[in-house]
Image (tube, helix red, strand yellow):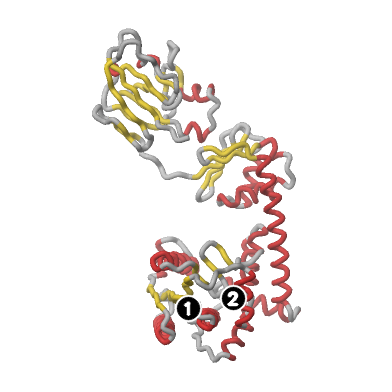
Amino acid sequence: MLELFEKYISDNDLFTPECKILLGVSGGVDSMAMLNLFIRKNFNIGIAHCNFQLRGKESDDDQKFVEGIAKHESVAFHTKEFSTKDYARKNNLSIQMAARKLRYKWFNEIRLKYGYKYIAIGHNLDDTVETFFINLLRGTGIRGLTGIKPKFKNIIRPLLFASRKEILQYTKDCKITFREDSSNIETKYIRNKIRHDIIPLFNRINTDFNITMNETIKRLKDSETILNKSIEKIKSEIFIKESSNNYLIDIEKLKDIKPIDSVLFEIVKDYGFNYQTVENIISSLYDIPGKKFYSKTHRIIKDRTALIITAIRKSESNITRINEDIAEIECPLPLIITRFNRPENYCIPQDRKYALLDADKISYPIELRKWKKGDRFMPLGMKSFKKLSDFFIDYKLSIPEKENVWLLTSGEDIIWIVDYRIDERFKINNTTRNILLIEYKKSI
């Protein structure tokens, strides 16, 4: 087992001997076997133990057991008690998901605070097979069928090479003590149902079932690599541009791709969209522009020629008031505000990031706000009012671009559509004596 452990670490480039590793140790058979292997290799480690307070005295005894082992082995020990049921109720989560979120969040806090490079988790080969079936039941793309990754960001899983049976034999041979979690025998959880009811059926049909599944998962991982390369090629062909964190997918090119549903799912799944939403998006491709689709983190807008993917941002303040004595603001837009007497032969800047206004026509405070339906102004060079919605159509602004437009107003009047056009009524002319110059420090 020790040699296989070393080889697995090396083959998967999990860590180097000088790395400081934080081990998640519950006291169960997997984590205790993992701890023993790390100690035998004399790696630089610490132990983290979570008490989720779900099994009363049994949870407290687990904590004391792991703490005693850490003290006996002279290994740094970190522990924390969690109000898991309260957290699950407040966040509308299952107990298992609540424990998972609490565990990984705290592990990462410990990692950063004490300088650990990686967090080691004691998942084994059987866990990979169980995860395959869990994802199969829930519905998944090919990624969900590739099991548990040996290394992901700061998480490593150095026991994925060994089955639960092999780990049990190792603990018996090395006389490693561990504690049984009574909840592991309950079948009310999906993973335990699969572990105790489903996989034993497969084992009766095929005595080498775990080996067969491990080989299948490996081939699926290889297939995922090939798929990802193909998807990246397609993305390079149908993505129009990337600007201001917006991603645009060319609708006409997308229509020519087959199978369109599977390809689009592979493209947008990383933004949190599921397969059902993808089917709805495809149905909208021949509809009029404006339909919106949401995941928890992103939004897709069906525009005229493109699907526009944008991150969902926290709502911004509706109005920012700017008094006469303010010379600069940073939020929600970086503006530099200068007032001065008009000099002779003044050269008017032509860049639209500047607004050059007659200061004597301005009433304070001026306000910076988003546009709303019904807004109108008199564009520079015109003698009549125009609705902003029509102005945006002239500029061919997409929905996200329109949502990012800011207006500078004086009283009820729009004096500047920031970075686009000032109002004709507030421009400087031959009678202007005082100038208000506003610069939008637009990031490049």
Which amino acid is tagged 2?
Leu
Q: Position of residue 84 (x, y in %)?
A: 41, 70
Residue named by callout 2: 159
- Residue 126 seen by the camera: no
CA gap, disc 1 and disc 2: 15 Å
Residue at 46%, 21% in the rendered image: 387
Indicate which disc, 1 or 2, sits on the residue closer to the N terminus. Answer: 1
At x 66%, y 57%, the residue is 141
- Above or below for 260 versus 392: below
- The one of 90 and 165 positioned closer to us in this rendering: 165
Q: Is residue 179 above or below residue 241?
A: below
Element carrying mark 2: loop
Q: Residue furthest top?
A: 430
Q: Secondary structure at mark 1?
A: loop
**Where residue 332 sits: x, y (%)?**
37, 37
65 shown above or below 439: below
Packing grade of label 1 (10 A; few <14, some 14-19, many >=20) is many
Q: Does 74 sit left or right of 158 as displayed?
A: left
Q: Determine the image quadrant of residue 211.
A: bottom right
Q: Residue at x 53, y 21 (%)?
A: 394
In which quadrant of the rendered view does residue 342 lie? top left
Q: Is residue 201 left or right of residue 323?
A: right
Residue sitting farthest toward the left: 325
**Mark 1 belongs to which amino acid?**
Ser
**Residue 232, numbered circle:** none
Contact, mark 1 vs mark 2 (Cβ under 8 Å): no
For this rendering, which residue is in front, 57 or 41?
41
Residue bearing the label numbered 1:
26
Image position of 345 with respect to 288: above or below: above
In the rendering, at what x and y percent does residue 338 appear? 30, 25
Residue 390 shows in the view = yes
* Residue 429 percent location from the top left of the image: 35, 10
